[in-house]
Amino acid sequence: MADIALKSSGRAAPREATAWERLKTNNSWLSIWFMLPAAAFLILFLAYPLGLGVWLSFTDTKIGRSGEFVGIENYEWLWDDSVFWLSVFNTLLYTIVASAIKFAVGLYLALLLNENLPFKAILRAVVLIPFIVPTVLSAIAFWWIYDSQFSIVSWTLRNLGLISSNIDFLGDVWNARWSVIFANIWRGVPFVAITLLAGLQTVSPSLYEAATIDGATPWQRFRYITYPLLTPIIAVVMTFSVLFTFTDFQLIWVLTRGGPVNATQLMATLSYQRAIIAGQLGEGAAISTAMIPFLLAAILISWFGLQRRKWQQGESND
Amino acid sequence: MTFFTRRTLVKGGTAAAAAGALTGPALLDWAKAWAQSAPWKPEKGAQLSILRWKYFVQSEDDAFVALMDSFTKATGVKVTIARESFEDVQPKASVAANTGAGPDLFWGLYSLPHLFPQKCLDVSDVADYLGKKYGGWVPTAITYGKGTGNKWLAIPVCYGGNLPNYRIEASKKAGFSKFPATTDELLAYAKAMKAQGTPGGMALGHASGDGNAWVYWCLWAFGGNVVDKNDKVIISSPETEKALEYAKQLYASMVPGTASWNDAFNNKAFLGGEIHWTNNGISIYVAAQNDPSKKQIAEDMDHGSWPVGPVGKPTEFALLFPLMAMTYTKYPQACKALMAYMLEADQFNKWLIASKGYLSHCLNAYDANPVWTADRKTTPYRDVAKRTLTAGGLGSVGEKAASAIADFVVLDMFAAVCTGREEPKGAIKIADRQLRRIYR
């Protein structure tokens, strides 16, 4: 009896935690549950459609009826399809030219906007407008500007006496390509410009002052201070820009529907036309899936580039 | 089989004769009587939704809405109307068919029902009823409705005729008092019109209505064909090459830029006086009549039939508008009742008149509708249903023909040759390869 009394009057000894209690406070276990909503969202709306798309590309599904597994037949057929390769060429041309020019113009704009200008805030807002306007609206506006009969550009040039007949913007193969690329550049420059501007703001002015004191020219200041410090931002913004440009659909669809004669047909628009409009879901899915290697390459370049300390911190030791 | 008492028939007769001057109560009585005696009684509490292509003639759409309203008054079934542009009806219908949910009825283009035949309600009873009552269906309508099977998958409501539109004065000055009747004459006409500064143009971009109408006409006029009657691909032939060479010569006399045209471009250009001949439905004429500033274009324009080519007979390609009900609908009887109601003389006559010739009937009895003779310029559109061939050419109108049209295989082939991107043999090779894949 005395033992019991002794035991109960003292503080209770800490008992062993049960397995459940250990689990409840285990960080790894808890983190899984916290991540579950986000993971479910990503899996449902990103991973599942992607997986389904890739699966569809291995079947001969048509809209309106399910198909069966056909292996790589869709890809074999696409391999010999001249329209498909034309769309690949168009997509690469469109992406490379548009991204390069967007980068150059965007960087230049960012450098200008970084200066102390009057109405700086308003200018920066105005520059952002092309990016904010819904793509379809600006595409329709360009559609009228590029019209082969009623274009304002043709009309102006004709009245100035510089040309004698309307410019065939969207009916001629190369004209159509440059017109579409121009529209994309107009739309995409603000994104690059504003993001690079944000990056420029992080460059410490004391670095510029030190360089100026040492007698650096503006070009040298740009080459040795601005550019290296901007490199991480450039990597990020150009990755996004390339991704968006490569998968562009709205602009092409509204302006040319992929014409004339498939001259502006990108992989995204060809995939839509084959899959939804012509009803061949399997083939369309194959075209979409064929975009993945290119996109992956673009991301990996950026990914491995960012791993290098030089890109991260702008120094020369890796 | 009589569905009506003499009283309702007389009422219906007077109502049809006085089309246009119909008073509300008479129509309502007739409609209610129809609803009571029609073989398809809508389910209790039925509600329907119908998706249709966006109108090109406003009055046609107004008449359509009025028709749906009168159906609601007669049967108590509420009908919700949704409209999509031409090209978007098919994707929406396809998605609805795939997912098993969406509008109950689709009023679409060409061989839409044959893209998913198992998802379309069997409407053979409605088709038989209408055929017997109104002088029979034209043969192409039967092909479109049944495909290669025995059941009607859709009701061919009407054709949208696509015919040459031309300016009279300019053509007279070029030496043509009426539209050319043969392909050789057309080539001479196009050259003459261009020489005097009044050229024309036909769409070579992905224009699903206008573009397909003229390239298929051209292909068939020279004896070319996509498939034979067994759906074997026969596009690779000397006749196809001839058709392509002809089109290339015709293109040389057109305004520049037609390779980028979709369906709306030629309307704009014609009404703006930039082109003086093109192919279109009657919408250009109607638009010109409705706009006071374009009245002189309306007076100066007329419509012709498609010229006949070396094959020696008409090879037109009109746009069929089939109406189909989906098997997932909760109210199949209501759908059938609506389909039959739409094509009954009282409703359909008024609707034809309101569309001003944009819709061409598929039932022979409607040849007598006054819209075809009230304005002489509308008459060419009356016989569109009789002169047209079907979307599969010699072959079936099923899923494969629909795919071939929707993927613009023939249109791209013509565009490639006309713009000089490909030689005829090269373009035919590409088209042949794509068609073999579609028809495999």
Image: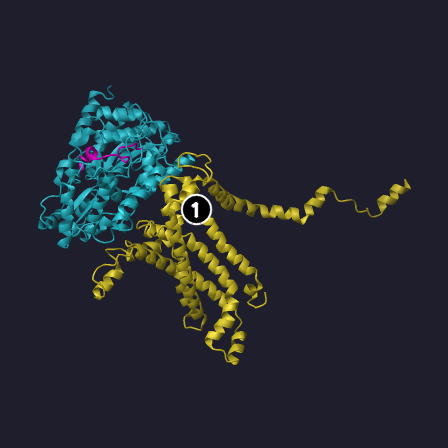
Is residue A239 found inside the magenta-colored segment of the image? no
Image position of A221 with respect to B229: above or below: below
Give the residue type that dot 1 points to. Ser
Please state the chain letter of the residue tagged with numbered disc 1 in the rendered image: A
User: What hue represents chain B?
Assistant: cyan
Image position of A124 with respect to B421: above or below: below
Residues rendered magenta in the picture = B381-397
Horizontal and vertical percent position of residue B221: 20, 39
Report whether residue B216 is seen. no
Which quarter shows the N terminus of chain B?
A: top left
Figure label count: 1
Q: Horizontally, is B271 left or right of B416 in the view? A: left
Horizontal and vertical percent position of residue A185: 38, 60
Q: Which residue is found at the position 36% from the left and 47% from the top?
A: A83
Point out the residue furthest to the top here: B1
Task: Look at the numbered disc 1 and give the secondary structure of its residue.
Answer: helix
- Kindly indicate which chain is depicted in yellow in the rendered structure: A
The quadrant holding residue B40 is: top left
Q: Horizontally, is A279 left or right of A71 in the view? A: left
